[in-house]
Image (cartoon, rainbow, N blue to C red):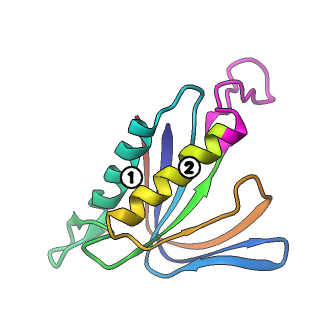
Amino acid sequence: MKFVAQRVLRATLSVGDVPVSEIGYGLVVFLGVGAGDTREMAERCAAKLANLRVFEDAAGKMNRSVLDVGGEILFVSQFTLYGDCTRGNRPSFTLAEQPARAEELYQYAADRLSAYGVPVKQGIFGADMRIEQVNQGPVTIIYEV
């Protein structure tokens, strides 16, 4: 399981021309679920995201979490994080989990984030989504369990 988290001032997710989710200050998180990933891995990702200190304190140091700043998370499933381009130019996605299991673990991770007290907005699993975001920093963190 892996995620890419980006610190944003705001973000909007739409499917087609229909807005689905919107957040203010916080994180946009793209979650990839790999073949064989577990609920324990999803729990570790949720704990890491809730407590990830990527927001600045009064001294300008990245020392505060999304919880500390009262931020939100836009949580988006993205199987393409498991795209393997080592052979040729077209990515293979054989390392990604099957859709039904991936959706289950994605939802579990979102629920665990909410349990930590983080306001979580989601995309629509498997949909062709458009995401507009205003990155701050920019700050981008990649994490793999």
- Number of numbered tags placed on the structure image: 2
Packing grade of label 2 (10 A; few <14, some 14-19, many >=20) is many
Q: Is residue 126 magenta?
A: no
Seen at 37% across and 70% down, the residue is 118
CA separation, marks 1 and 2? 10 Å
| Residue at the far right in the pictured view | 16
Which of disc 2 and disc 1 is earlier in sequence? 1
The rendered magenta stretch, by its main secondary structure, is classed as loop
Judged from the image, the secondary structure of the residue bearing numbered disc 1 is: helix
Measured as percent of width and height from the top left, residue 48 is found at 32, 50
Measured as percent of width and height from the top left, residue 66 is found at 33, 69
Q: Which residues make up the magenta segment? A: 79-100
Tell me: residue 121, above or below residue 45: below
Measured as percent of width and height from the top left, residue 82 is found at 63, 34
Seen at 49% across and 46% down, the residue is 3
Q: Mark 1 is on which residue type? A: Ala
Q: Nearer the viewer, residue 127 or 136?
A: 127
Is residue 144 in view from this perspective?
no
Measured as percent of width and height from the top left, residue 95 is found at 64, 25
Q: Residue 71 appears in which quarter of the rendering? A: bottom left
Q: Which residue is mark 1?
A: 46
Seen at 80% across and 59% down, the residue is 128
| Residue at the far top in the pictured view | 87
Determine whether, in the image, residue 92 is placed left or right of residue 76.
right
| Residue at the far left in the pictured view | 59
Packing grade of label 1 (10 A; few <14, some 14-19, many >=20) is many
Q: Which residue is mark 2?
A: 106
Q: Residue 42 appears in which quarter of the rendering? A: top left
Is residue 109 in view from this perspective?
yes
